[in-house]
Image (cartoon, rainbow, N blue to C red):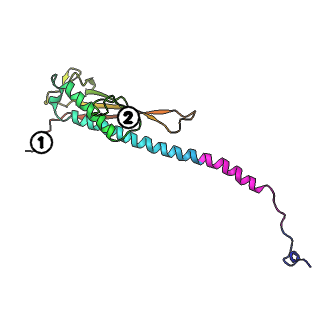
Amino acid sequence: MHFSDLRGGTRPPRRHGRSGQSVVEFAIVVPVMLLILLAIADMGRVYTSAVAVEAAGREAADFGSFDASFWSPANAATTVALMRERACTAAAGSHLEGYETSDPVNNTTCSNPTFTCTLELGAATGTCESGFAGTADCSDPLTEPPCVVHVQMDYDFQLLMAVPPLPQSIEIVRHSRFSVSDLQPPP
């Protein structure tokens, strides 16, 4: 009597070629999982970059809205230059990937992200350099409602997964608006 007869049957037949199936499954699943991980990493990078660009715009708009006298004809150009410097310094300090400037020491200007400033009062708008929103003088502290300083930051974000049909870059645009108010420091 044979040992297999004591167990109540014979061994199941060996299946040949099953190990190849595992290799094929692995070869299909691993690239898909890597693509998913890269997409998650890119989304995290997009989010942190958008937050940094938003913070840079808010820093500039907050400075510009601090005092109505900033928008007098004598001060408007200086105010815009200081706003641009604050926005670029904040963007550089957040270590934006792809940040570009022609002045890496002081960050007085930057080309990625770009800075745009307008003054708004209702439907009327004007450039910050003019100090006017339409015909309204934004340097007058009695302007009611007050002018709004609008800063727009545009940032060209480069994706890790620049594989067709996906885009190579995404433009992140952030707007910050602050009403001009004559804030006085406490006595």
* Residues at marks 1 and 2, CA–CA distance in whole angstroms: 34 Å
Question: Which residue type does callout 2 highlight?
Answer: Tyr
User: So how many labels did they put on this image?
Assistant: 2
Rate crowding at label 2 as few (under 14), some (14 to 19) or many (20 or more) other CA atoms within 10 Å: some
Res. 121 visible in picture: no
Residue that lies at the very extreme toward the front in this rendered image: 105
Q: Nearer the viewer, residue 171 or 78?
A: 78
Query: Where is residue 114 drawn, in percent x and y?
Result: 35, 29
Q: Looking at the figure, which quarter contains the C terminus? A: top left
Which secondary structure lies at badge 1? loop
Horizontal side of 153 relative to 130 (left or right) equals: right
Front: mark 1 or 2? 2
- Is 159 part of what is drawn in magenta? no
Question: Which segment is the magenta one?
Answer: 12-32
As for residue 24 lying within the magenta part, the answer is yes
Q: With 39 as the anchor, is 52 left or right in this view?
A: left
Disc marking residue 185: 1
The location of residue 132, given as percent across then percent down, is 21, 23
Name the N-terminal-most of marks 1 and 2: 2
- Quick check: 82 above or below 2? above
Residue at 44%, 35% (x, y): give it: 157
Q: Which residue is mark 2?
A: 99
Residue nearest the viewer, comparing 100 with 44:
100
Q: Quadrant of the N terminus?
A: bottom right
Residue 30, numbered circle: none
Residue under the image location 28 percent in, 25 percent down: 123
Assess disc 1: are there few (<14), some (14-19) or many (≥20) residues with their C-alpha within 10 Å of its C-alpha.
Answer: few
Give the secondary structure at mark 2. loop
